[in-house]
Image: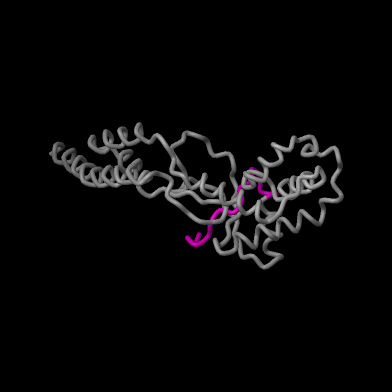
């Protein structure tokens, strides 16, 4: 897999992922399908990976892809049954969808705008862009409270365990992908510095420990 692709959407089943891939490909967006085997895009939050299939595209195509999905939703939105669950949402809940559009489908995002408009709450592009920018700022914030992992990393690294190397590497290099395709470091600068130190300590101690054990056997 090439490194210039970023995660655009994640799905729990292959059929949904293929449907999106086909829509994007049909509209001239180069994309690829992959499973989300743990990589440097994971965190130490302790959450389990639920989504198993990822549609990945070039970062430069994220905006165009979003527009394609919104237009696709527009084409079927007038056919939606009024019993659809979003019609029972409060205005605040609908605004929440607009704010956290990355957590909702393009259809729900577009329908939320339509419902608000019907209720006399007009939504313009300026507001949508403002909400998306606020969301990006929030998601770009580094993960907090890495102290337990830093302590564990130093301990394992000094004891000569490979786990110290792994913890240090992820703290130092781990990145997350924002809804606009941009990749940012997952952890604060100070935590990443500790990760770098842990990694290099492990890089020295682990081979030394292995060599010592080998020599002891003779």
Depth check: 147 or 218 in front? 147
* Region in magenta: 1-16
Residue at x 66% of width, y 57% of height: 66
> Residue 191: image x %, image y %?
34, 42
- Position in image of residue 34 (x %, y %): 57, 53
189 or 12, nearer to the observer: 189
Q: Residue at x 27, y 36 (%)?
A: 154
Q: Is residue 156 above or below residue 197?
A: above
Q: Which residue lies most toward the bottom here?
A: 28
Residue 42 locus on image (x, y percent): 47, 44
Is 32 a magenta residue? no
Q: Would you identify the image quadrant in which residue 55 lies?
A: bottom right
Question: Count the marks: how many?
Answer: 0
Residue at image point 73% right, 46% down: 108
Horizontal relation, residue 31 to residue 185: left or right: right
Task: Using the image as rendered, state which of residue 88 and residue 149 is in the foreground.
Answer: 88
Please, is residue 60 above or below residue 17 in the view? below
Instruction: Name the quadrant of the C terminus.
Output: top left
């Amino acid at each position: 897999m090439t490194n210039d692709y970023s995660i655009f959407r994640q799905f729990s089943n292959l059929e949904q992922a293929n449907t999106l891939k086909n829509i994007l490909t049909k509209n001239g967006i180069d994309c690829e399908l992959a499973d989300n085997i743990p990589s440097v895009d994971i965190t130490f939050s302790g959450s389990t990976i639920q989504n198993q299939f990822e549609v990945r595209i070039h970062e430069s195509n994220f905006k165009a892809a979003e527009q394609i999905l919104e237009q696709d939703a527009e084409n079927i939105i007038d056919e939606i049954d009024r019993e659809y669950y979003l019609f029972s949402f409060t205005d605040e809940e609908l605004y929440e969808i607009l704010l956290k559009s990355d957590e909702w489908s393009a259809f729900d995002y577009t329908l939320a705008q339509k419902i608000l408009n019907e209720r006399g709450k007009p939504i313009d592009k300026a507001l949508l862009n403002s909400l998306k920018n606020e969301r990006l700022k929030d998601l770009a914030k580094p993960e907090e409270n890495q102290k337990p992992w830093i302590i564990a990393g130093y301990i394992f690294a000094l004891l000569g365990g490979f786990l110290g190397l792994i913890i240090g590497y992820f703290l130092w290099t781990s990145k997350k992908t924002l809804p606009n395709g941009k990749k940012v470091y997952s952890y604060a600068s100070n935590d990443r510095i500790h990760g770098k130190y842990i990694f290099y300590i492990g890089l020295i101690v682990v081979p030394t420990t292995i060599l010592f054990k080998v020599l002891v056997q003779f």
